[in-house]
Image (tube, helix red, strand yellow):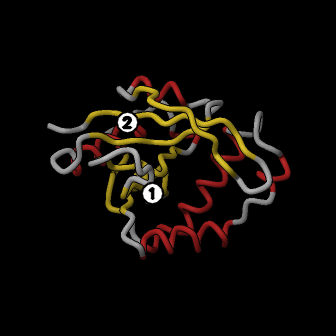
Amino acid sequence: MSAGYEISRGQKEDIPALAKLLIYTWQQAYRDFLPLSFLEKMDVSRQEKRHQRYMDSGIRYWVVKDREGELCGFTSYGPNRFKQYFNVLELYTLYVAPAHQGNGLGTQLLEQVITENGERYDSIVVSVMSKNPYLGFYLKNDFAVIAEDEIDFGYFQVEGLILEREVRR
């Protein structure tokens, strides 16, 4: 682990910080290609309820915090939603606060998920927007593009990619 940081299992008390970090990173990373009106309407309480539902349903989280206990990043993962892929885990989220990027935290969160699940699954998939400025992170971490997909946000859609990485040991 990078000096001054600690990874632990995400807990319900982390939800408010998860929601704020998700919104902040979206507003920073995607402002060049998602509608500003969408990004500005992102709501912390709605995100809190969403992550509460996810945790209640069994979706697992890992979080990384700094020395002061501030949430710096998180990841969530669970059953694969793509029917065409078998024995595959899905990475739903992986976010690191911009101020903490470049310290290897994203890779360490990803490796935590893979270490925990590498015996049970053949691979891990993630769906990302094709214009995601962090696409290179996934490619650098041995993911490969396996399909194109459209991501539906309700009143608009964006081009997406499905990436996969083998994890079976």
Residue hosting label 1: 68
Residue hosting label 2: 107
The residue located at (46%, 73%) in the rendering is 13
Q: Which label sits on residue 57?
A: none
Q: Quadrant of the N terminus?
A: top left
- Decide: marks 2, 1 in contact (CB < 8 A)? no
Crowd around label 2: few <14 · some 14–19 · many ≥20 (10 Å):
some
Q: Is residue 42 left or right of residue 100?
A: right
- The image position of residue 157, as x and y in percent, is 73, 45
- Foreground residue, 70 or 128? 128
- Foreground residue, 58 or 123? 123
User: Callout 2: helix, strand or loop?
Assistant: helix
Q: Please state which amino acid type lies under the numbered disc 2.
A: Thr
- The image position of residue 25, as x and y in percent, is 63, 46
Task: State whether residue 65 appears in this view.
Answer: no
Q: Please state which amino acid type lies under the numbered disc 1.
A: Glu
The residue located at (51%, 46%) in the rendering is 95
- The image position of residue 151, as x and y in percent, is 64, 45
- The image position of residue 58, as x and y in percent, is 36, 70
Sequence-wise, which precedes: disc 2 or disc 1?
Answer: 1
With respect to residue 113, does 58 lie above or below? below
- Foreground residue, 53 or 66? 53
Q: Quadrant of the C terminus?
A: top left
The residue located at (80%, 60%) in the rendering is 41
How far is disc 2 from disc 1 in space, using C-alphas?
A: 21 Å
The residue located at (70%, 40%) in the rendering is 158
With respect to residue 119, does 46 lie above or below? below
Q: Is residue 45 left or right of residue 103?
A: right
Q: Is residue 82 left or right of residue 112?
A: right
Point out the frontmost of discs 2 and 1: 2
